[in-house]
Image (cartoon, rainbow, N blue to C red):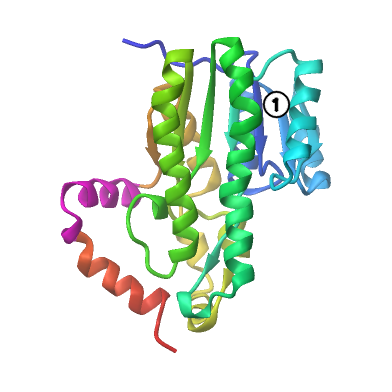
Amino acid sequence: MTAKASFESAVALVTGAASGIGEALCRQLSVLGAHLVCADSDFDNAARVADSLPNARAIQLDVRDLKQWQQTVEDILATEGRIDYLFNNAGICVIGNVLNMAHAHWDSLIDVNIKGVCNGIEVCYPVMVRQGSGHIVNTASASGLFPTPGFTAYGMTKHAVAGVSQSLRVEAARYGVKVSAACPGMINSNMAENAQILGASARIKEQQPDIANKLPSTDYCARKIIKGVRKNKAIIPVTAAAHIAWRLFRLSPGLLNGLTRQMAKQLAPVE
C-alpha cells in the first residue's frame, strides 16, 4: 500500500490563492505544516492570506503569462530549493447558453482555465521530474466529468483539465511524480459569486439570491481535496452530488439524460 502524502515542511505553490478554494487550500495546508507560496494576479489579497499564515509568502502571478510562471518557479527554487506540490487552482467561470457566448468569452476561459494550467505544468513538472518526486493537483470541476448544459464552454475547459491530468498521471508515474484532478462541483465560493452569467441564465441568480449559502463551503472543499491528494486519487470529486453523477455517467451515460435536459432548460434556456 502506498504511503499517504505528508505536507509537513513541504513546499506548496497554490495559484488562485487570494480567495475562494485557493485561500481555503492555503489555510488547510498551513495547518498541516506546509511552506506556502500564495500566488494570484490579485497580489494584495494574496498577501493578506499569506500574512495571516506561518511559513507563507505571496507572489503576483497571472497564470496566462508563461514568463511570469518561469520567474515564479525560479524564485521558489532560489529560496526554497524545491517544489513538492503545485495546486494549479486559478480559474474563471462563464455560465449561459452557447448562443450567448461571445468570442471573448471563449478566449478568456481558454486562456485562464486551460493555458493557465498548461503553463503551470510546463514549468513545474520538469522540476519535479528532476527531484524524482512531487504532486500536481489541477482544479478541474464536476463539469469536466459529465455533461453540464449551461456550463458548456466552462465545462469544455474543465474536461481539458481532467483529461490532461489523467494522461499526465500515467506518464509522470515513472518519474515518481503524482498528478490528480480535483473536481469540486457547486461550492459556495467567490468564483460562483463572480461568475459571468449570460442571457436568460442570469434570472436564476436573481430568483434564488441565497442559493450560494446552501452550498458546501470552500473549507469543506479544501479538506476533501487534501484528503484525496493524501490518498493519491486520480480524480477527486468533492461534493456528494458530483461523486454520484460522475459514477452514474461512467456506469451508463443515458441515466443522466433526464437531469441534463432539465439543466439545459434551467441554465441554458432558449431566449
Name the residue rendered at 35%, 74% in the picture: 264
- Whether 250 is drawn above or below 84: the answer is below
Name the residue rendered at 38%, 31% in the picture: 234
Q: Is residue 36 magenta?
A: no
Which quadrant holds residue 80?
top right
Name the residue rendered at 81%, 44% in the picture: 43
Left or right, 238 with reference to 23: left
- Whether 210 is drawn above or below 43: the answer is below
- Whether 54 is drawn above or below 52: the answer is above
Q: Is residue 245 magenta?
A: yes
Q: Which residues are magenta?
A: 240-255
| Magenta span dominant secondary structure | helix
Percent x, y of residue 12 = 64, 25
Count the marks: how many?
Answer: 1
Percent x, y of residue 202 = 53, 79
Farthest-out residue, right = 44
User: What kind of residue is marked 1?
Assistant: Leu
Q: Which residue is at the front of the view, 240 or 269?
A: 269
Q: Which residue is at the front of the view, 160 or 223?
A: 160
Q: Which residue is at the front of the view, 30 or 15?
A: 15
Looking at the rendered structure, the secondary structure element under dot 1 is strand
Left or right, 58 with reference to 125: right
Tell me the crowding category of disc 1: few under 14, some 14 to 19, or many 20 or more residues within 10 angstroms, Cα based.
many
* Quadrant in which the N terminus is drawn: top left
Residue carrying label 1: 36
Left or right, 142 with reference to 126: left
Percent x, y of residue 175 = 48, 14
Q: Does any portion of residue 86 appear in the rendered image? A: yes
Percent x, y of residue 216 = 46, 51
Which quadrant holds residue 256?
bottom left
* Quadrant in which the C terminus is drawn: bottom left
Name the residue rendered at 25%, 67% in the picture: 259
